[in-house]
Amino acid sequence: MDRRDTIKSLLLGSIAGGVGLSTVPGCKTDDKTPAISPEKVGLYGRNEAELAHDQKIFAETYLTEYELTTVAVLCDIILPKTEKFGSASDAKVADFIEFIVKDIPNHQLPIRGGLMWLDHESFSRFGKSFAEASGPDQIKIIDDIAYPDKENKKPEFAQGRSFFNLMRNLTVTGYFTSKIGIDALGYVGNRPNIWDGIPEDVLKRS
């Protein structure tokens, strides 16, 4: 079982337990006007206070375009495109994470600090930002921070490991609450059935 199948199994168990799924886009066109409003994306069932909160979040800017580019690169390393399903970028996971860091401010410093750590590590090793480094060089850094149970963990990678754990959690959440991710899970939820009477074979046995 590969990592995507493992995640699917875990999430299907959560859905069976009653977890609701919804996509939360957070893309923007500039610093003042959100590209997508809560009303347009179907966030129904929201009271006035909740809608006002959503409008405020959609209108804010926290992560820069440069930071969002790095987020997208990292998300695609965590959940790359496969033959059957799209990547994290295809599911607009970077937009989801941008929304989350504005909606939950205590994520802001860990995310921004982690992105700075990632670039510092990449510049130290390869003389390039993480987003500009080659794929194999990016993986060399990720291999040092992606496995919390790895033996001989280097203390200088502690911040990187903490950051990667947070990003992995947000990426998986963003992906598997998107349409692409739900299709990947194969989750269809409850569906109406059509009653066309007692089956003929049952009637014959009566």
Image (spheres, rainbow, N blue to C red):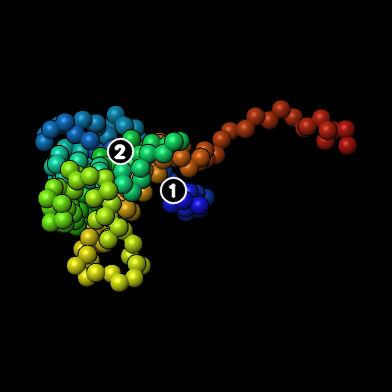
Mark 2 closeness class: few <14, some 14–19, many ≥20 residues within 10 Å: many
Which of the 4 image quadrants contains residue 152?
bottom left
- Which image quadrant for residue 181? top left
Q: CA distance from mark 1 to mark 2?
A: 15 Å
Which class describes the residues within 10 Å of circle 1: few (<14), some (14-19), or many (20+)?
some
Q: With 159 as the anchor, is 191 left or right in this view?
A: right
The label on residue 150 is none
Q: Which residue type does callout 2 highlight?
A: Ser
The C terminus appears in which quarter of the rendering? top right
> In screen coordinates, is 8 left or right of 150?
right
Residue at image coords 78%, 32%: 199
Residue under numbered circle 1: 4
Kindly give the residue lying farthest to the right in the view shown.
205
Helix, strand or loop for disc 2? loop
Residue at image mark 2: 89
Residue in the foreground of this view, choosing between 196 and 4: 4
Say what secondary structure mark 1 lies in: helix
Residue displayed at 81% across by 30% down: 200
Dot 1 or dot 2, earlier in sequence: 1
